[in-house]
Image: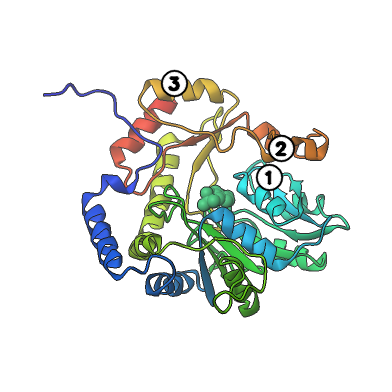
Amino acid sequence: MPLVGPMQVPMTVMDNSDPALVRELVGAIEELAGTGAFIGGPAVDSFERAFAGYAEAQHAIGVASGTEALTLAVRALGLEPGDEVIVPANSFIATAEAVVLAGGLPQFADVDPETQLITPQTAERAYGPNVRGVIPVHLFGRTASIEELAEQAGSHGAWLLEDCAQAHGARYDGRRVGTFGAAGTFSFYPAKNLGAWGDAGAVVTNDAELAEKIRLLRSHGEQPRYHHRAIGTTGRLDAIQAVVLERKLGQLEQLNERRRQVADALRAAIGPLDTLQLPPAAAPPTDCVYHQFVVRTPARDRLREHLSQRGIASGIHYPIPIHRSDAFASLNGHRDVAPVATKLATEICSLPIFPGMTAAQVEAIADAIQSF
Ligand SMILES: *Cc1c(COP(=O)(O)O)cnc(C)c1O
């Protein structure tokens, strides 16, 4: 008999922990392999229809990653040299990278200290004469004030693109994220709320012309075969990933609901503390599908050490805000253009969250925090 050690709580749990799911997906992949349709074909078409239906959008375009989804969408929206696009200072770096890859310059907007999201107030300060677009991020699964941000973009003559890489299925005022502006982009990186077995992504839009442009760009601007109308790339979604994603899409609604329940349970078990700020519950019209459960404390590094000693994983999303990264700092002459994001980066700590978290794991996390 092994000794009963301290409970181990990982940050997240991947598909390899579910042998029945693994068997089902391997069977589906085997079936696909027998058809030889590895690029494009019925599996990709079928997932695109299913994902458009889920996202309540008219079009979904499967692409190679979330970064490719952002880059192709920005390219399709069109930038001229010198054009600027507003992005939040705290996001995964891909949001800003895509702007540069599409020929633009990111303008970093600071974030709200409570929600850690871009707001109409923080975005307003980033608008200038060269801004052509804005990419709000529904970070950690929490919806930004997307209606107001879209209205604001319109008043500045800018387009809005939603980065939904952490917010599959979240709703704002009852409506799925992704279609409040020109388009919405998704990542299916394995650890995301909907994860592939490799890299994958999608763009959703209600604009047929934009959808067509993105379809062209993801495959060398080719239409028909060997007639290249634009400079594109190899940015398509693999059929194998489409098969995996379509099977998993059927469970997403239920898994997101479990994430909300686990977040409520964590909030209740940890309770209000003077020294630790919990992520706020999402009140209508906002929503949160808890890709991450991020707490805030000035004693962050000591808290992480304490959790680690008790077998509880933790993370930092993100330790260096984008505008301070080596890749982007010189762009702003090393000025700190987003001081709230900079301060947050020293105090935030992501606790474990995943749909299958047990009551005992919730208790173990709460006990560890209370004993700190
Ligand atoms: C994961 C992520 C991306 C990039 O997605 P990839 O599939 O890894 O390219 C973009 N934006 C945000 C907010 C993300 O979390």
- Judging by the rendered image, the residue that carries numbered circle 2 is 340
Residue at 20% across / 24% down in the picture?
4
SS type, badge 2: helix
Where on the picture, by quarter, is residue 241? bottom left
- Quadrant where the C terminus sits is top left
Any mark on residue 112, and which?
A: 1
Task: Evaluate whether residue 57 shows in this view.
Answer: no
Q: Position of residue 81 (x, y in %)?
A: 82, 57
Q: Position of residue 285 (x, y in %)?
A: 58, 62
Any mark on residue 235, and which?
A: none
Q: Earlier in the sequence, mark 2 or mark 1?
A: 1
Left or right of 244, for residue 148: right
Residue at 70% across / 53% down in the picture?
99
Q: CA distance from mark 3 to mark 2?
A: 26 Å
Task: Evaluate whether residue 193 shows in this view.
Answer: yes
Any mark on residue 306, and which?
A: 3
Q: Earlier in the sequence, mark 3 or mark 1?
A: 1
Q: CA distance from mark 2 to mark 1?
A: 7 Å
Left or right of 7, for residue 217: right
Answer above or below: position of 340 versus 123.
Answer: above
- Quadrant where the N terminus sits is top left
Disc 3: residue Cβ within 8 A of ligand 1's nearest atom: no
Q: Please tell me how crowded label 2 is: few (under 14), some (14-19), or many (20+) other residues with Cα within 10 Å.
A: some
SS type, badge 1: loop
Where on the picture, by quarter, is residue 306? top left
Marks 3 and 2: CB-CB under 8 Å? no
